[in-house]
Amino acid sequence: MEFIQILSQIIILTTLFLLGGPILLSNNKSFLDKNFVDQLIINLVIQINFILILTFFNFSLKVITSIYFLLFLFLFFLNAKIIMRFFLSNKNYTFVLLILFFILSIDIAFSLVLDWDAQIVWFYKTLNFYNYGTIKDLTNLPVGDGYSYPHLGSLLWAFFWKISLIADEYSGRLFYVLIYLIALTSIVEKLKINFFSKIIFLVFLLNISYYYNFFGGSQDILIFCFIAFVSFYFYEIFEKKLKKLPILTLLIIPLIFNCLIWTKDEGVIYSFILLFVLTFFSKIKLNQKIFVISATILFFFIRIIIYKFYNLDLTINSCCYDYSLENILKNIFSKKTFIFFKYFLLFGFFKNYFFIFGVIFLLISFYNQGYNKKTTYIFVFYLLSFGFLFLAHISYKDSIDMDYHMKNNMHRLVFAISPFFLSIFVHYYNSLKNKI
């Protein structure tokens, strides 16, 4: 019976997000001309932003699901032929994703252990939305500073739990599995290999990266996925030295940044790091850069306005961190720096197979081809991300057990930013293919 329920939830999720693309953009030729993975990313990002924006109006999940499904059904019946054509033309990818989705979902369903952060913060938010609470009700949650955290991940968890035929909360977390699969597929899709080889490599990436704790309710898996989507577009931008972005790409990149902004506080920093990389290292036209910068800043200020309007706390983990310049300078040459590097290496990089995989091919690439200027953006992203993680962790207050927190958190924090490690391999492999 459990297997049947899981299968039903998989069908619901894949129907919404595999069909949603051609439904929402069925008359847009530039969308229909894109490959299947690109369509999935565009569709996911648009629908996630749509669900998120509905919460800004203080709507309960009952209202949000009603609006969502009315729009979905209307567009579905309006574009039935295009949807059928979409399914038939991408049946191989759809079938593979369904099989992998089912296998990973079984593990989620039979583990049922929530991450520590999920237990004390994220699940309270999820229950708020699941029980028809609104964004305004987040101020009433008994989680201290936790109510100030962004709510996108918990909203999606509650949304898919509510529409599920399964009574258990894990049904909502199955969405994390779906978006994770699409994130890995977006990396694989850039390789210049045949479909069968892509599936083999996708299974390989799953084997070296899947870890149940990433799906225990913490939001770092979503950060990983959104950064993977950005890397999907950045590869094209920097590899081809694009000077003009397609209109959909130009719109989707800021929307992905918005997803990061509303997933975790760290997502705000990563979105602006990625914005910096795009602005100063790409060759796209100035007017397009200005558009992406303006849109991203606008999304950030919308978050501030929403927080102010609903009296949510804008302070970032005031219980644990002291971000004053005096405290940071005091700790740079203290024991905290040693502790950071110890856990950053042992539980971050050296426990991250994507990092090891990327470094191996970075060395091979450098030995065979020398320094590749096309990958500069990757190093800048990681240098700035490393700097952010370093400053954040040495800002711990003296009352906080830094050893405990870093030992338990560093693995997933580094994993969250790891998609670009694989981009090094993609650049190298495709450059070899171009020479043949």
Image: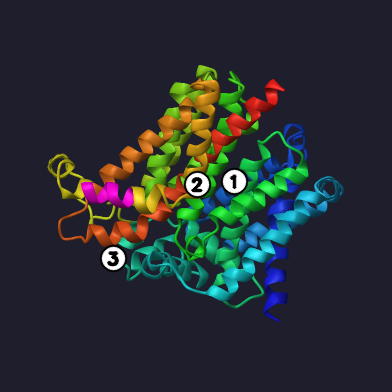
Residue 339 drawn in magenta: yes
Q: Quadrant of the C terminus?
A: top right
Note whether 292 is above or below 312 in the view shown: above
In this picture, is 53 found above or below 105?
Answer: above
Mark 2 touching mark 1, by CB under 8 A? yes
Query: Element at badge 2?
Result: helix
Pick whichever, 404 or 371, lies toward us: 371
Q: CA distance from mark 2 to mark 3?
A: 24 Å
Q: How is the image coloured?
A: rainbow
Residue found 40% across the figure and 66% down from its top: 137
Q: Amino acid at mark 3?
A: Gly
Tell me residue 141's x, y (percent): 35, 69
Q: In the rendered view, does 408 fall on the left or right side of 66?
A: left
Q: Which residue is mark 3?
A: 144
Q: Amino acid at mark 1?
A: Val
Give the residue at mark 1. Answer: 45
Q: Which is nearer the eye, 262 or 269?
A: 269
* Residue name at image x 28 percent, y 43 percent: 390
> Which mark is on residue 259?
2
Quadrant housing residue 8: bottom right
> What secondary structure is found at the residue carrying circle 3?
helix
Type of secondary structure dominating the magenta stretch: helix
Which stretch did the figure color magenta? 338-344
On screen, residue 31 versus residue 159, left or right, reads: right
**Is 401 one of the magenta-colored residues?**
no
Q: How busy is the neighbourhood of tag 1: few (under 14 within 10 Å), some, or many (20 plus)?
A: some
Callout 1: SS: helix
Label 2 is placed on what type of residue?
Answer: Cys
How far apart, in angstroms, are the residues tagged by discs 1 and 3?
30 Å
